[in-house]
Image (cartoon, rainbow, N blue to C red):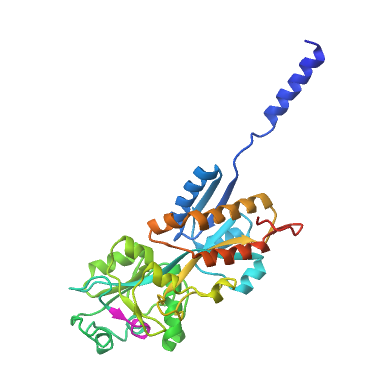
Amino acid sequence: MPLIGRRSLCMVAALSLALPMAQAAEVLGAGASLPAPVYAKWARAYKQSTGNKVVYQSIGSGSGVAQITAKAVDFGASDSPLSGALLEKNGLLQFPTLLGGVVPIVNLPNTKPGDVKLSGPVLADIYLGKIIAWDDSAITQLNPGTSLPNLAIAVVRRSDSSGSTLLFTDYLSKISPEWKTRLGRGVTVPWTVGLGGKGDEGVAKFVQRLPGAIGFVDYGYAFSHNLNYTQLKNQSGAFVAPSPQSLAAAVSGNWENSSFSEILTEERGQGAWPITGATFVLIRKVQDKPEQAREVLKFFTWAYKEGGKFASESNYVPMAESTSRAVATLWQLVRDGGGKPLYE
């Protein structure tokens, strides 16, 4: 072979070694722990379907917001929606991926899930330490025909910072002026009564151990562990039990047409569960890495279309088709540095 031929072959071989092998797309997300089990299932199924990899780190909502704000991840995740002003300030867009809620649970003899009925004002007064026994008239009047014991109420709440606490206290702030003034709303509040449990597991263990106890846990946790949940009286005056249908009933067209910044507590729907919320994904409006952003949007497009069964299997509630359509419209705002829309 002529020398030049050999040299050409050597150059081609050297270049082929220097160039990276073509790889499947990979994106990185981080944030809220609540949706992590579903995101993991989605990521496995998505990789099987497309060959593309999604890595999600469960590090908490606050850290997820910080990571996406710092451009350290391709998407962040939070159980608490950011306000429109904060989204605008940080150049972010948010959209919901799963519905959830907070469910009061009790340890009362001779009752099964859904037997006990409570109202928002009564629940607030229990957590304010004003109602201290299960046979208090404020409770018995809501439960005609149900025998409630002369038993002290053992109040259990979260000891750690929690999106569940935010939903719970947001609800109580809306229905109790005293609660709003004294304790307010947040991922943690200055509790005045009760035992603190870490996470849903800690709260549930306290409730199951203490006769007469009441606590609150995430909807999915309550059902996956067969806990004794209560009904709640909603804004329309109906007593409702937590269910996929009652959580979905809290979603309104106004929410879908907004930036999803409102928390879905005390909504007006006839069958709405009054302590409903969603978990959210955060992405940047202007993308330095457009191909990564396209892959994020492809992943969540797939999740809306194909991921519902995985969510339901894990006792989460997938988004309605009307919500996914509203989100797709919102995605038109995601653009590259030159202003070109990235959602296809």
Closer to us: 127 or 137: 137
Q: Is residue 112 left or right of residue 81?
A: left
**Quadrant of residue 199 within the rendered picture:** bottom left
Q: Position of residue 291 (x, y in %)?
A: 66, 49
Tell me, yes or no, whether the highlighted magenta stretch contains residue 178: no
Tell me which residue sits at (26%, 77%) in the image: 116
| Residue that lies at the very extreme toward the top in this rendered image | 1
Residue 49 drawn at (x, y percent): 51, 44
Q: Nearer the viewer, residue 180 or 12?
A: 12
Q: Which one is nearer the viewer's eye here, 210 or 280?
A: 280
Residue drawn at point x = 51 percent, y = 75 percent? 252
How many numbered discs, if any? Answer: 0
Q: Looking at the figure, which quarter contains the N terminus?
A: top right
Tell me where residue 58 appears, x and y as whole percent. Answer: 48, 55
Q: Which residues are magenta?
A: 117-123
Residue 228 in view here: yes
Q: Which quarter shows the C terminus?
A: bottom right
Does the image show residue 161?
Answer: no
Residue 69 x/y as whole percent:
62, 61
Up the image or down, 116 lies above or below 320; here it is below
Q: Residue at x 62, y 69 (%)?
A: 87
The picture quadrant where one finds residue 266 is bottom left
